[in-house]
Structures are given as C-alpha cells and as structure tokens.
Image (tube, rainbow, N blue to C red):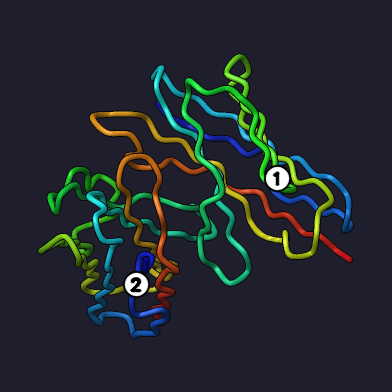
Amino acid sequence: DAGVIQSPRHEVTEMGQEVTLRCKPISGHDYLFWYRQTMMRGLELLIYFNNNVPIDDSGMPEDRFSAKMPNASFSTLKIQPSEPRDSAVYFCASSFWDTIYFGEGSWLTVV
Amino acid sequence: AQKVTQAQTEISVVEKEDVTLDCVYETRDTTYYLFWYKQPPSGELVFLIRRNSFDEQNEISGRYSWNFQKSTSSFNFTITASQVVDSAVYFCALSEETDQAGTALIFGKGTTLSVSS
C-alpha cells in the first residue's frame, strides 16, 4: 500500500505569496493530521480531521493558515500570505484506530 | 494536561555500544497510547512502536527493545549494539483515547542519537 503522499516535497517562495501544501492520506484511514516541525518548537499539531470534518484547529497559528479536506483522499494546508517565520517542515499524517503514519513532509522556505 | 519529556537532547555513542533513550510522560487518562518514531537525516518520520496503557510487557524487535513502566510513567527505548544507520532523531509521543484510539499525538522534543564508527 502507498503511504501518506505529500506535495510538494520542497518549496521556496517569496514573502507574501500564497502557499498550498497537499496531502493524500492512506486509503481507508479516517483521521488526517497536519503537523509543523521547527527547530524552536519541535513537532506541533496544527489541525486534524475525522471523516473529513475538522475536529481541532486550535494549533493553527493564525488566520493566515487554513486547511480543508474536501474528500477522504485529499487535504490541503494553505498559507496566505506567507511569512519567513512560516519556514518549516509540514507533515501530513493519517490513521485508522491507533497508529499514525506520516508522510515524508513538505519543506517550506519563505524568503 | 498531556506532556512528554525527553530529557536527553543529544547522545553520542560508538558503534556496538548499547544506548537507552529516556521518555517520561504525563497524562490524567487511564487509557492512553505511547509511541516511538525515528527521524533519520532524510527527514521522514518512521513509526517504530505503539504501546497501550494496559500492556506493560516489554517488547523486543531485533536490536530494539522498549521498557514501559507505569509506576514511573516511563517508556524507554534501548538500542543494542548500535550501528551508524541508527543515527537519527528519536521522538517519543503520547495520545489519549477519546472515542477512538490514536487521536492526535503529543511529541517530546526528541533525542538526537549520533553513532560513530
């Protein structure tokens, strides 16, 4: 089975631009998570969905961040406008029952 | 509140040494899950093990072993006869049960393990 698939793997963008990160969870998984990893803050949960419905978005840092899950096989995390402090690795993960599997991450650099 | 503490920020060992990575957790729930993930230099997060709070049996998988002790709220990870390929950041994580096991993970800060030849 394919794992969690994220795109793009790497993105460099200029401050102020819109960034969209994409995620395809493992088929059959009903939970989807977005995490962010930085040196300063480690791994932080941004938002998670259950059956395509957002359950907890308390980790989303500010209104510039938004996430959607229009169907069971696709989710997006959007940053608009992007800022240099958004530079991080963004992980998507999915689970069914009790083990969460991560994608390879999207490495975002905002200059 | 949930919390995971990995007190060891960095550990350096020489190949073939045994090394133990410590993990201490806090939770008010009686049902919870503990995890270890490995993050090699390539950056992906690799699942290693999951343990639920009712199963205190130690587990061994090849050179890896895990010691879960509820009395001390610890879930330590030992690598026996370490190899250079074990060099990575290792994360301990906790999730509490809601209506379904395995909701959002709370991660520790990670321990960077460097194994030299």
Residue B83 in the image, given as x and y percentages of width and height: 80, 60
Relative to B113, A74 lies left or right: left
Residue A55 in the image, given as x and y percentages of width and height: 18, 43
Residue B62 in the image, given as x and y percentages of width and height: 71, 48
Relative to A72, A19 lies left or right: right
Disc 2: which residue = A6
- Going by the numbered disc 2, the residue's amino acid type is Gln
Of B16 and A68, nearer the camera is B16
**Residue at figure coordinates x 39%, y 19% from the top left:** B29
**Residue at figure coordinates x 22%, y 43% from the top left:** A56
Residue found farthest to the top: B71
Disc 1: which residue = B64
Q: Is residue A25 above or below residue B101?
A: below
Residue B69 in the image, given as x and y percentages of width and height: 62, 21
* SS at badge 2: strand
The residue marked by circle 1 belongs to what chain? B
**Residue at figure coordinates x 56%, y 42% from the top left:** B92
> Where's the N terminus of chain B, which quadrant?
top left
Relative to B8, B93 lies left or right: left
The residue marked by circle 2 belongs to what chain? A
Of A49 and B62, nearer the camera is B62
- Going by the numbered disc 1, the residue's amino acid type is Tyr
Q: Whole-Å distance between the Cαs marked 1 and 2?
A: 29 Å
Q: Are marks 1 and 2 in contact (CB under 8 Å)?
A: no
The crowding category of the residue bearing disc 2, from other C-alpha atoms within 10 Å (few below 14, some 14 to 19, many at least 20), is many
Nearer to us of marks 1 and 2 is 1
- Find residue A16 and report its image quarter: bottom left
Relative to B85, A15 lies left or right: left
